[in-house]
């Protein structure tokens, strides 16, 4: 099939490359010319595992191209995916849908024949009819343009895997047996035929699916982090508790890792957007648990700062963070990405800086992005050098690289050998044997 993908960020660029991998002829469209040039050279403008290889492979075969022209995109195909960002509106707990509506408004006047517009972006429930109305109003093809809702559940750092072998496929349509359904079933034929559960539903259910899934995932993480708060008061170990709970098949181990909590471009914003939309629909009572999930998550960031203060007070009889040198391992919101959106690690680093500490951050991939957003912090490439002369080391993003560092190599350098493990993935015994005072959230 020929198809386009409008919006080439983490979601759209991955989708475009994966659709080419499925055998389709794909034109990615993004209004950022620099991004288009980078993608056309077979490289991703961000770090996502294996994506460069897939882009290089399919830009070389000619099956994958990128453009900044809506006119070119409209003429290229009659199936158009939209994967533009729907970030959180600054200062509000709502989705900013301006990129989505702008993409629809620019594509619509160029749709002269029958077309299917399949939206992948995450939105509040009730957006699909508005997209349909805009398309019918502004497209010369009028109501021969059909809308499909196809939420995307990919995780960054597993984006290709999750796109080509998803846990499930959700296809939302306005009515049964539409042309849009035929088109999407054809587009995803290889994925469907490989046995992927495929749920065909209405627009509203498809729209809710993503917000509900992310709200559940966020709640699961916050549940175990709430248990960490109880562990901290009772000298219990939340990591062992998570293991015990996780063996119950009804609970499951995945997504139950305690620590500094969730960040990123999806979970925090989807949780808040979902709560706000439910309230406007008159279902606020149903979201109490989600408010609490958000609150627990924020408290984890404060807990690291409190633990830092407490530990410094214990070691130096001085809990004042002002003037302390603190080394932070991790800037990305999770390992194996350069994405720093709502990064818990950087939120903690910034807070410590505000409290007067000198904070030096290191990360294998995310330093360029972090530098742009946080000029007030210091940055260094080498995690070992980062610890030199530090009063305290904070481990805040669990990159495998950090886990492999032998603490004996660091022990002679810092004036105080204090480490706080915000993710609980360093080996406490190894660090203690190397002479470090090891503390972790949710651990005695
Ligand atoms: C998430 C959803 O998983 C995905 O389905 C959706 O499409 C987009 O949002 P992503 O943001 O890439 O994906 O990352 P995910 O791996 O879910 O992690 C989100 C955050 O939660 C990270 O900050 C991570 O460190 C944290 N997390 C995750 C935990 O603290 N504990 C866990 O057990 C899992």
Image (spheres, rainbow, N blue to C red):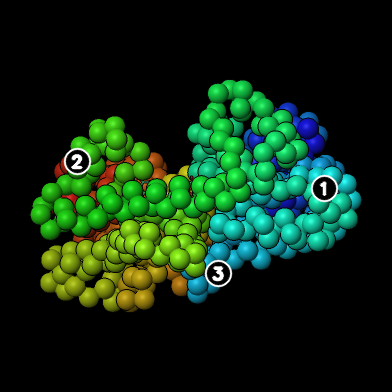
**196 w.r.t. 89: above or below:** above
Q: Which mark is residue 144?
A: 1
Q: Is residue 349 visible?
A: yes
Residue density around tag 1, few if under 14, some if 14–19, many if 20 or more, within 10 Å: some
Residue 384 picture location, percent across and down: 36, 51
Q: Earlier in the sequence, mark 2 or mark 1?
A: 1
Q: Quadrant of residue 254 in the image?
A: top left
In depth, the one of 107 and 389 nearer the eye is: 107
Q: Is residue 192 above or below residue 173?
A: above
Residue 240 - label:
2
Q: Nearer the viewer, residue 412 or 278?
A: 278
Pinpoint residue 195: horizontal percent, then vertical percent. 55, 23
Q: Which residue is mark 3?
A: 89
Query: Mark 2 or 1, which is nearer the eye?
Result: 1
Q: Position of residue 116 (x, y in %)?
A: 76, 44
- Residue 163 percent across, percent down from the top left: 58, 37
Q: CA distance from mark 1 to mark 3?
A: 33 Å
Horizontal side of 283 relative to 51 (left or right) equals left
Q: Is residue 261 left or right of residue 264?
A: left
SS at badge 1:
helix
Q: In 3D space, how far apart are the residues under numbered discs 2 and 1 (Cα atoms)?
A: 57 Å
- The residue drawn where x is 56% and y is 64% is 95
User: Which disc is residue 314 wearing?
Assistant: none
Label 2 close to label 3 by CB (< 8 Å): no
């Amino acid at each position: 099939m020929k198809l386009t993908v409008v919006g080439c960020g983490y979601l759209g660029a991955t989708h475009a490359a994966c659709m080419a991998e499925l055998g389709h002829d794909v034109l990615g469209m993004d209004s950022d010319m620099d991004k288009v040039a980078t993608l056309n050279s077979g490289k991703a403008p961000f770090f996502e595992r294996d994506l460069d290889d897939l882009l290089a492979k399919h830009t070389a075969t000619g099956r994958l191209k990128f453009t900044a022209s809506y006119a070119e995109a409209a003429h290229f195909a009659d199936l158009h995916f939209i994967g533009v960002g729907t970030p959180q509106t600054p200062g509000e707990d709502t989705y900013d849908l301006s990129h989505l509506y702008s993409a629809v408004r620019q594509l619509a006047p160029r749709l002269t024949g029958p077309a299917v517009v399949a939206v992948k972006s995450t939105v509040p429930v009730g957006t699909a009819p508005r997209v349909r109305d805009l398309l019918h109003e502004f497209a010369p093809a009028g109501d021969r343009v059909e809308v499909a809702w196809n939420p995307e559940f990919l995780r960054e750092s597993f984006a290709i895997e999750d796109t080509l072998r998803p846990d499930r496929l959700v296809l939302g349509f306005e009515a049964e047996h539409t042309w849009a359904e035929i088109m999407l079933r054809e587009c995803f034929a290889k994925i469907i035929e490989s046995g992927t559960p495929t749920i065909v539903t209405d627009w509203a259910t498809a729209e809710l699916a993503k917000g509900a899934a992310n709200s559940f995932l966020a709640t699961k993480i916050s549940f175990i982090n709430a248990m960490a708060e109880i562990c901290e008061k009772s000298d219990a170990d939340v990591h062992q508790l998570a293991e015990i709970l996780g063996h119950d098949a009804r609970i499951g181990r995945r997504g139950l890792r305690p620590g500094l909590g969730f960040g990123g471009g999806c979970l925090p914003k989807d949780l808040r957007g979902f709560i706000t939309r439910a309230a406007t629909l008159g279902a606020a009572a149903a979201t109490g648990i989600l408010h609490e999930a958000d609150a627990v998550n924020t408290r984890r960031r404060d807990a690291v700062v409190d633990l830092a203060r407490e530990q410094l007070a214990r070691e130096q009889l001085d809990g004042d963070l002002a003037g302390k040198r603190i080394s932070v391992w991790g800037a990305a919101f999770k390992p194996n990405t350069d994405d720093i959106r709502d990064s818990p690690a950087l939120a903690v680093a910034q807070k410590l800086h505000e409290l007067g500490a000198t904070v030096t951050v290191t990360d294998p991939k995310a330093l360029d992005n972090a530098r742009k957003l946080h000029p007030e912090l210091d940055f260094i490439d080498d995690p070992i050098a980062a610890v030199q002369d530090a009063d305290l080391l904070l481990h805040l993003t669990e990159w495998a690289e950090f886990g492999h560092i032998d603490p004996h190599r660091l022990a002679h350098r810092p004036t105080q050998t204090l480490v706080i493990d915000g993710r609980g993935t360093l080996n406490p015994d190894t660090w203690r044997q190397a002479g470090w005072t090891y503390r972790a959230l949710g651990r005695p």
